[in-house]
């Protein structure tokens, strides 16, 4: 029997999630208002929904089953965008661990990106166009420091094409918001 949206979880098993929608509001493609993103999450029965910036960042409380949650939200967003949509989820402890693994803590956070991927990266990914960029794969993420800035970089990482990237300022802010959402649940 397929679970419906309301059967996916209860408030007792809810946890805080950070969702990162891939390829929205970038270069005029994949237009998605954050109000529509929040409404899509709420229509799936998720609670305490908050968005951050206009780049597809959303926080919410939902069931602990990330696989079914991702499938449900991908389907809802695909219908909304009228094209395939990908949402990558990380819970608050995972986001905290990702930031702890950051090998570029001494670098400008606006010039350091975390590529969030749906699958684990094994070894150092193949790249092209690398100039001065530093690359560090770590599980389901790839950290990249762009010392010369991102806009002029020609770096291509085929393994990252199925993922989405956020700079460290954004990732830190999402962690802070996720921790606050967790604290409001328990406090």
Image (cartoon, grey):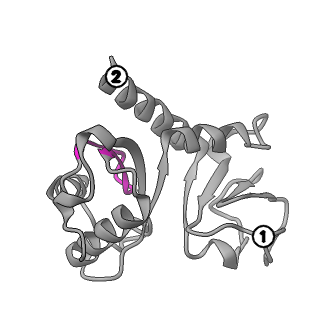
Task: Tell me the residue at 70%/75% (across/down).
Answer: 156
Between residues 173 and 40, which one lies in front from this camera angle?
Answer: 40
Q: Please identify the residue farthest to the front as the structure is shown.
A: 1
Circle 2 residue: 186
Q: Secondary structure at mark 1?
A: loop
Between residues 8 and 121, which one lies in front from this camera angle?
Answer: 8
* Side of 60 where 172 appears, left or right: right
Task: Tell me the residue at 31%/27% (across/down).
Answer: 185
Q: Position of residue 164 (x, y in %)?
A: 53, 64
Q: Position of residue 2 (x, y in %)?
A: 24, 75
Task: Tell me the residue at 14%/58% (across/down).
Answer: 43
Q: Quadrant of the C terminus?
A: top left
Residue 65 sits in quarter:
bottom left
What is the CA distance from the residue labelled 1 to the residue labelled 2?
37 Å
Disc nearer the start of the sequence (1/2): 1
Residue 5 sits in quarter:
bottom left
Circle 1 residue: 122
Residue 141 sits in quarter:
bottom right
Which region shows up in magenta?
Answer: 47-61
Is residue 25 in view?
no
Is residue 96 in view?
yes
Say above or below: 39 vs 24.
Answer: above
């Amino acid at each position: 029997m397929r679970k419906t949206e309301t059967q996916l979880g209860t408030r007792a098993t809810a946890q805080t999630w950070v969702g990162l929608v891939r390829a929205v509001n970038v270069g005029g493609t994949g237009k998605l208002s954050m109000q529509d993103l929040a409404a899509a999450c709420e229509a799936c029965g998720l609670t305490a929904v908050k968005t951050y910036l206009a780049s597809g960042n959303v926080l919410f409380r939902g069931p602990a089953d990330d696989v079914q949650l991702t499938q449900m939200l991908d389907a809802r967003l695909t219908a909304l965008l009228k094209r395939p949509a990908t949402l990558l989820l990380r819970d608050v402890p995972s986001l905290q661990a990702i930031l702890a693994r950051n090998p570029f803590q001494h670098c400008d956070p606006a010039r350091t990106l975390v590529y969030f991927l749906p699958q684990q990266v094994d070894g150092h990914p193949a790249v092209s166009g690398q100039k001065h960029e530093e690359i560090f794969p770590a599980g389901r993420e790839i950290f990249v420091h762009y010392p010369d800035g991102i806009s002029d970089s020609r770096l291509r990482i085929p393994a990252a094409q199925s993922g989405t990237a956020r700079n460290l300022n954004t990732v830190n802010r999402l962690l802070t918001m996720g921790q606050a959402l967790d604290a409001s649940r328990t406090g």
